């Protein structure tokens, strides 16, 4: 079972920051948080991952709380092409596989 | 560097036929994962393989489904005697040999059983 909970859906205006929350209260000390997104009918696309420090790359920023029980993915300037289902995943430290939950359906509107 | 390559992208099979889906991992990647996505549902883990070894097949149906990743050539997901309920998108992913390296996904193979 997925170890994360996310809101089912969110809306964001084009050009504004999209902040996608994720709860992972049972995360273990050596488990990473990964974010992927899936645009309709395409394969999941890797966005970013982190352990306990905040991370930033060309796509997004990942903010992880100090207790590591939750995190937020930030898309700083959302565009229409960012409309997708966003998955927050705690990667299994024993088997190394990704277990997908139901994700957050982000709709960016003009 | 080419990404994860899957073929065929679309496959139509009649009930009772066999379906073979192929996956070539990214260059230098020796770990392969297969996932299935039924219409309007999330991705479900099926199997995790390394070269010539099945590491975790906890998500594979017990019958009709098999997977391999030979020393040479692509990984193959094989579905025997397909039924309508097998109609889905099948995604392959790969990662390098070191644990916790990023996993990258292919664009999927869409199986339709008629």
Image (cartoon, coloured by chain):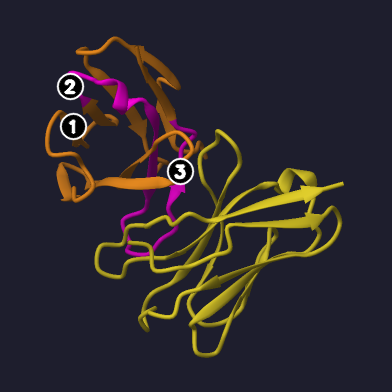
Q: Quadrant of residue A4?
A: bottom left
Residue drawn 32% across the image and 64% down it: B99
The chain ID associated with circle 2 is B
Q: Earlier in the sequence, mark 3 or mark 2?
A: 2
Q: Which residue is the site of mark 2? A: B80
Q: Magenta span covers which residues?
A: B79-108
Q: Could you tell me which secondary element the residue under label 1 belongs to?
A: strand
Q: CA distance from mark 1 to mark 2?
A: 6 Å
Q: Earlier in the sequence, mark 1 or mark 3?
A: 1
Colour yellow belongs to chain: A
Q: Which mark is residue B76?
A: none
Q: Which residue is the site of mark 3? A: B105
Mark 1 vs mark 3: in front: 1
Colour orange belongs to chain: B
Q: Which residue is the site of mark 1? A: B65
> Which residue is situated farthest in the bottom direction here?
A66
Residue A27, percent from left and from top: 39, 78
- Specify whether residue A99 is in view: yes
Q: Is B83 a magenta residue?
A: yes
């Amino acid at each position: 079972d997925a170890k994360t909970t996310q809101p089912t859906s969110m809306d964001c205006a084009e050009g504004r920051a999209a902040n996608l929350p994720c709860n992972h209260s049972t995360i273990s000390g050596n488990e990473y948080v990964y974010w992927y997104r899936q645009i309709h009918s395409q394969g999941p696309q890797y966005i970013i991952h982190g352990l306990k420090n905040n991370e930033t790359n060309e796509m997004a920023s990942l903010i992880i709380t100090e207790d590591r029980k939750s995190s937020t993915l930030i898309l700083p300037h959302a565009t229409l092409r960012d409309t997708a289902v966003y998955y927050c995943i705690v990667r299994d430290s024993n088997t190394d596989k990704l277990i997908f939950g139901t994700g957050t359906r982000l709709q960016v509107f003009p | 560097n080419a990404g994860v390559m899957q073929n065929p992208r679309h496959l139509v099979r009649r009930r009772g036929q066999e379906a073979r889906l192929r996956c070539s991992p990214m260059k230098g990647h020796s770990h392969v994962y297969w996932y299935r996505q039924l219409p309007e549902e999330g991705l479900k883990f099926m199997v995790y393989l390394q070269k010539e070894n099945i590491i975790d097949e906890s998500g594979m149906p017990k019958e009709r489904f098999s997977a391999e990743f030979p020393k040479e050539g692509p990984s193959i997901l094989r579905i025997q005697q397909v039924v309508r309920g097998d109609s889905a998108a099948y995604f392959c992913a790969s990662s390098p040999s070191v644990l916790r390296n990023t996993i990258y996904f292919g664009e999927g193979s869409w199986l339709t059983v008629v």
